[in-house]
Amino acid sequence: MKVYVTDYNYNTFDPEHEVLDELGIELILKQCQTEDEIIEQCHDADALLNQYGPISRRVIQSLENLKVVGRYGIGFNTVDIEAATEYGVIVSNVTDYCLDEVSDHTMTLLLSSVRKVTQMNNAVKAGNWDYKVAKPVYRMRGNTLGLLGFGNIAQTLAQKAQVFGVNVVAYDPFVPKHVADSYDVTLVSLDELYDQSDYVSVHLPLNAQTEKLVSHDAFKQMKESAFIINTSRGGVIDEQALVQALEKGEIAGAGLDVLENEPIPDGHPFLEMDQVILNPHSAFYSVEAEAELKRKSAQNAADVLQGYLPNYIVNPDVKENVQLKEK
């Protein structure tokens, strides 16, 4: 059995080896950026562990031994889920590995945006010792945080924001009211969220329904004093619309850990905007979270190769097309 890592920016694979070596499963590391490279270099893969490389219908069709694609992460927009299900390929992810990391990071971007910490830091280092460069700064307590999506990370974030005296509302048509009530969070419509929120935090997967969901109309509805935070997927926000909204003063600022294109292209307007905080898609990271992600991703692949359904399945409909047992 062969498990290929299609692409990676990790320094160690000890967690994967701890899972796979004792089962006699070979781990093979590649750095594939395109469909053709994956097809050529991973042609005999029984399983793929995937970070950013495209696992398209063509890739899935071409890898005849493929049984499982394990995503290093929560999101799965790199994988053609419909094709995987059609060809009997399990797609797995790890939905619970970085809840504290991402919610902490989101809260950090929010606090830094509202308190203008990064802006004042840059001013001081440039020789300007004057808090007035950050004016205006408004009190957080009593303000409203609107969550676009109310999954595990957003639920964890809500509890942390409430400690600061912030009211929390959320838009998520897939979450029952009793779940939101258990977190003292009010479910609202999308329009209501934009109208009410002093801060908007994005926690949505990237798909056909969410791509560029936050665009011109959304920014026009938001308060001029509002900040938007994104630690999910860059493509959920229409970046050109956000640039225009910031230039026109339709909103106050943004804290972005993710972008439409990563790394950020040279000359991007965000690079010259003091009211925009940029991070390099790092919210997921801690030493502990990375090790947990890698171990669980490898275990997902190992489970399938041993004839079992993994703990995390993105495409449960595939169960009809595979002969796998419950663990």
Image (cartoon, rainbow, N blue to C red):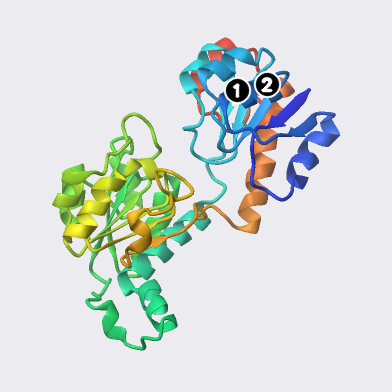
The residue under the point 28% across, 77% down is: 134
Left or right of 232 in this view: 219: left
Q: Amino acid at mark 2?
A: Glu
User: In the structure shown, which secondary structural element does the residue marked by tag 2 occupy?
Assistant: helix
- Whether residue 309 appears in this view of the structure is no
Asked which quadrant contains residue 52, the reply is top right
| 39 relative to 273, above or below | above
Nearer to the camera, 193 or 13: 13
The residue under the point 78% across, 22% down is: 1
Marks 1 and 2 in Cβ contact (< 8 Å): yes
Asked which quadrant contains residue 324, the reply is top right
Q: Amino acid at mark 1?
A: Asp
The residue that disc 1 covers is 36
Left or right of 310 in this view: 191: left
Nearer to the camera, 313 or 58: 58
| 72 relative to 41, above or below | below
Q: Position of residue 265 (x, y in %)?
A: 43, 49
Q: Which mark is residue 22?
A: none
**In what quadrant of the picture does the C terminus appear?**
top right
Q: Position of residue 277 (x, y in %)?
A: 38, 63
The residue under the point 65% across, 56% down is: 288
Q: Position of residue 206 (x, y in %)?
A: 39, 36
- Whether residue 56 appears in this view of the structure is yes
The residue that disc 2 covers is 40
